Image (cartoon, rainbow, N blue to C red):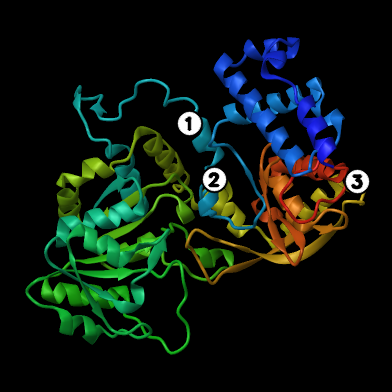
Amino acid sequence: MTENKTYLFKKVPAVDKLLNTRRISELLEIYPRDMVTNAIRQTLEQLRYQIKDESLTTETQLKTETVIDLVEKKLVRITRPSLISVINATGVIIHTNLGRSPLAETVLEKLGSLPGGYCNLEYDINSGKRGSRYVHVEGLLKDLTNSEAAMVVNNNAAAVLLCLETIAKGQKVIVSRGQLVEIGGSFRIPDVMRKSGAQMVEVGTTNKTHLADYERAIDSDTSLLLKVHKSNFALIGFTEDVSLSEMVSLGRRYGIPVMEDLGSGCLINFSDYGLPMEPTVQDALAQGADLVTFSGDKLLGGPQAGIILGREDLIKSIRENQLTRALRIDKLTLLALEEALRLYMDKQKAAKKIPVLKMIFQSYDSLKEKAAYLAKLVTDINTDNFSLELMDGNSMTGGGSLPHLRLPSKMLCLVPNRLSAQHMETWLREYDPPIITRVKGEKVLFDVRTIGDKELMTVARAIKDLALIKGEMRGTDNKKYT
């Protein structure tokens, strides 16, 4: 074996030899010389490593054309953008790691026409003077929610931070202990409040908070009553909470504003579609909340943004805070948000056009048909590597929204034969475009709820390509088959 390794090491082609080939010369017309040279060196180093660990054992793998194929593939990988489109087959609708909410077609069409040139971001065309970037969405938000005023920043954590820093810096904010949520990525309400300079006053217990708990905590330094919607977890059993309307009444008696952080932000009544009721932005404002904050993506289905609605005097103060400049929204996000909000002018249209809502509201019967169609597209495959199976399962809303909601769905599964579930998941994840699946019970699951209709053919092609993989099994590592 040692003699064979020595022989193979000698057969690894030299860098100069490869640089003088016709195919590499063609690659040099596409890529910078330094990039090509580095790709060659990295490829040769990888081949030497494979010889050393005995995963490369034949001379044919070191032929010039074979090595150049590897170099070309490496160059394609190097020059491919880091941020790329993927197919979400996980069944998690608002998938934080996959960019949360996909945008509606009308939003994408608008993004293609405007951002490349100049625009009236902060220019009032009527007066010919400097304007405000917030006017592009403020009118829409006010019309849709009956709010006095509105403004937008770059995400909801920023919205909460900005409100607290403006209204309660150096003063007390009363919040229920059962609402001290972790927003995600270890961002926690207590931490956000600490950064704002406000002093947090916890009241009640984890499972029970009464109105009297808030009232006993109020003193001359209290500047805000805060309610945080438990959008990313559910508290059940022996529990009690104070309603927003009760908090508003208490705040009115003591002259203290009330703010609710709704988190996900919802503009549509989910109960109209047979789903559990989710508090809407309109409801919070109708109950008298002085400020309401929520995300522009997640359940709203727009781009990442933090939206602040409420009393005109409070919004004015927030807008004048110097921190606003550091957290402000850019023209691309404003454009996408404006187009997403326009869809809500017709709620029924929004439910059909906004991808997140469309996926949440999909019926089980329609998903059953969709899964059957996908299975039909791949019925003629060779089943040596895996077999196909349709099964029931549950999709999730994700993104810290509706944590208790499980949506019945239909899934196409790859059942391992020669290939393991781990190998298949890795291969699909490295496909072009990457297809992100779930592995459960040693099966690879494709939840059709989150696979777009236009993506079904691509998924079918990937499954067919996976079925054609040949070669011996290599244990349970992540090495690709060829």
- Looking at numbered disc 1 in the image, what kind of residue is underneath it? Lys
Q: Where is residue 346 in the image (x, y as percent from the top left)?
A: 48, 48
- Which residue ends up furthest to the front in the rendered image? 3
The relative height of residue 309 versus residue 272 in the rendered view (above or below) is above
Question: Dot 1: what SS?
Answer: helix
- Identify the residue position indicated by label 2 in the image: 102
Residue that mark 3 sits on: 381
Q: In which quarter of the image is the C terminus?
A: top right
Real-space CA distance between mark 2 and mark 3, rounded to the nearest whole angstrom? 31 Å
Determine the residue positioned at 37% across, 47% down. Answer: 305
The image position of residue 328, as x and y in percent, is 28, 41
Looking at marks 2 and 1 on the same chain, the residue that comes earlier in the sequence is marked by: 2
Does the CB distance between marks 2 and 3 fall below 8 Å?
no
Mark with earlier residue (3, 1):
1
Q: For the residue labelled by badge 2, is the local secondary structure a helix, a strand or a loop?
A: loop
Q: Work out whether residue 451 or residue 165 is closer to the camera in this orientation and state it.
A: 165
- Number of dots carrying numbers: 3
Task: Answer above or below: position of 162 versus 273.
Answer: above
Q: Is 276 on the left or on the right of 15, as rendered?
A: left
Residue type marked 3: Ile
* Sooner in the amino-acid sequence: mark 2 or mark 3: 2
Q: How crowded is mark 2: few (under 14 residues within 10 Å), some or many (20 or more)?
A: some
Q: Mark 3 and mark 1: span between their CA atoms?
A: 40 Å
